[in-house]
Image (cartoon, grey):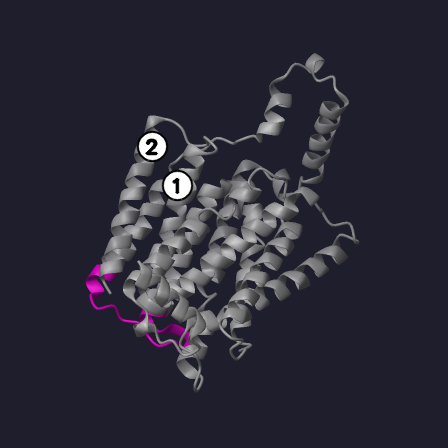
Amino acid sequence: MENNITTVITTLLSTTQAPESVSGYVGFLCLTVSVLFFGSNYLPVKQFQTGDGMFFQLILTLAIWTVGFVVHAIRGFPKFYALPMLGGFLWSTGNLNTVPIIKMIGIGMGTLFWNTILLIVGWAVARFGLLGVKPEVPSNEILNYVGVIFALISGIFYLFVETESSVPEERQHLINAPIAEITTETEISGVLTNVDDDIRSETFFDKLNTGSKRLLGISMAIFSGFLYGFTFTPALYVQDNYENASQNGLDYVFSLYTGIFMSSIVYFTIYCIVKKNKPMVFPKVILPALISGWMWGIANSSFFLASNSLTQAITFPIVSSGPSAISALWGIFLFKEIRGRQNFMILACGFTFAVIGSVLCGISK
C-alpha cells in the first residue's frame, strides 16, 4: 500500500512519466476513485433548483477549472497545449443538455443513453486509432470486445428501472402538513419561496407533452454522449503526434479544463444576452455546484492517471458503465427513488453485467 502511494506521488510530480511505468494496481485504484466520483458528483445538487442549468454549469465549470489549476501546479506547470481545449469545448457543449435531459427523461435514462454512446465512441477512438490517434491494442482482444458488449448490455437493464421523485426533507414537512398548521412566518415564507422557485425554474422543456419530451430527451442524450466520447481525443492526438509531447495525461488536464470553463463563460454570456440580462440564478445552488465540479474534476484527473497505466481501450468501458451503477445505488439507499422487488432484480442483473464487463476489460490488458 505504501509503495502504491509513493508511485502515485511520483507520477504526479514527474513531468515525463510514461504509461508503462505506472503500476497496474495504481491504475485500478485511480479508476475506482474515478467511477465513484463520476457516479456521485451530482448528489450535492440533486435537492436544489437548477432552472435551465446555465447558471449551474457556470459554477460547476469554475470548480472544475480550479481542480485543473491545482493539478497543473503540482505537475510543475508543464507546457500548455491549446488543442485539448477543443475537447473542453465539446464536453461543455454536451453538458449544456444535462439539466434539460434530466427534466425530460430522468437522470437514470439520461445517464444510460449518454454513457452508452460515450462508451462506444470513446472506446472505438482509442481501440482503433480514429482521427489520428494511435490504436491501443489490448493483450487479449477477445476479452476486451466481450467486456465492452457486457458493459453495453448492463445499460439496457437500467432502462427498465422505474424511479420515484424525491423531495428535500426541509420541504417534506410543509408538503405533508395541513394548511392550518403552516402558521409561522418562516414556514409561510418558505412555501412562497419554493413556489416562486418552481415557477421561475419552468422552461420550454417543461411545457412539452410526454411523447415530445421523450423523443427530444433521448436525442439530446445521444448527442451529448457523442460529444463526451471525443472529449479526450485532442489530448490523445497531441500525445501521439506532437514532438516531445508529455505521455502523462495529467499534463493535459489544465488545458482541457480551461476549454471547459472558457466555453461555459461564452455560453453564459450569450444566454444573458438572449435573456435580456435576466438569467435564471439560484444562489442556493452555488456551493453544491462547486462541490459537484470539484468531484468531477478529481474524477476526470483520476481517469487520466488510470489511463496512463491501463490505456483508454480498457478504462473507457469501465468508467462509462460503472457510474450508472453507483448512481442507482444512491437512488436506492439515500433517496429511496428505486423501490420494489422487480426493480431490485433488474438492477441486480445490470450490476452483474457491469461487473463482469469491467473485470473482462481489466484483465484484457
Q: Nearer the viewer, mark 2 or mark 1?
A: 2
Q: Which mark is residue 290?
A: none
**Could you say where residue 198 lies in the image, as x and y percent from the top left?**
67, 35
**159 within the magenta span:** no
* Along the line of sight, the residue nearer the viewer: 41 or 207: 41
* Along the line of sight, the residue nearer the viewer: 133 or 222: 133
State which quarter of the image contains the C terminus: bottom left
Answer left or right for 217 relative to 142.
right
**Could you say where residue 296 lies in the image, as x and y percent from the top left?**
50, 55
The boundaries of the magenta stretch are 126-144
Mark with earlier residue (2, 1): 1
**Could you say where residue 77 lies in the image, as x and y percent from the top left?**
54, 76
Residue depicted at 36% across the width and 50% down the height: 322
Quadrant in the picture for residue 47: top right
Q: Residues within 10 Å of mark 2 (few under 14, many from 20)?
A: some
Answer left or right for 30 relative to 144.
right
What amino acid type should be assigned to the residue bearing mark 2? Phe
What amino acid type should be assigned to the residue bearing mark 1? Leu
Residue sitting farthest toward the front: 2
* Along the line of sight, the residue nearer the viewer: 145 or 284: 284
**140 within the magenta span:** yes
Q: Which mark is residue 344?
A: 2
Quadrant in the picture for residue 18: bottom left
**Could you say where residue 347 lies in the image, as x and y percent from the top left?**
33, 37
Residue depicted at 61% across the width and 22% down the height: 173
Residue depicted at 32% across the width and 60% down the height: 2
Q: Residues within 10 Å of mark 1 (few under 14, many from 20)?
A: some
- Say above or below: 18 vs 59: below
State which quarter of the image contains the N terminus: bottom left
What residue is disc 1 on?
A: 159
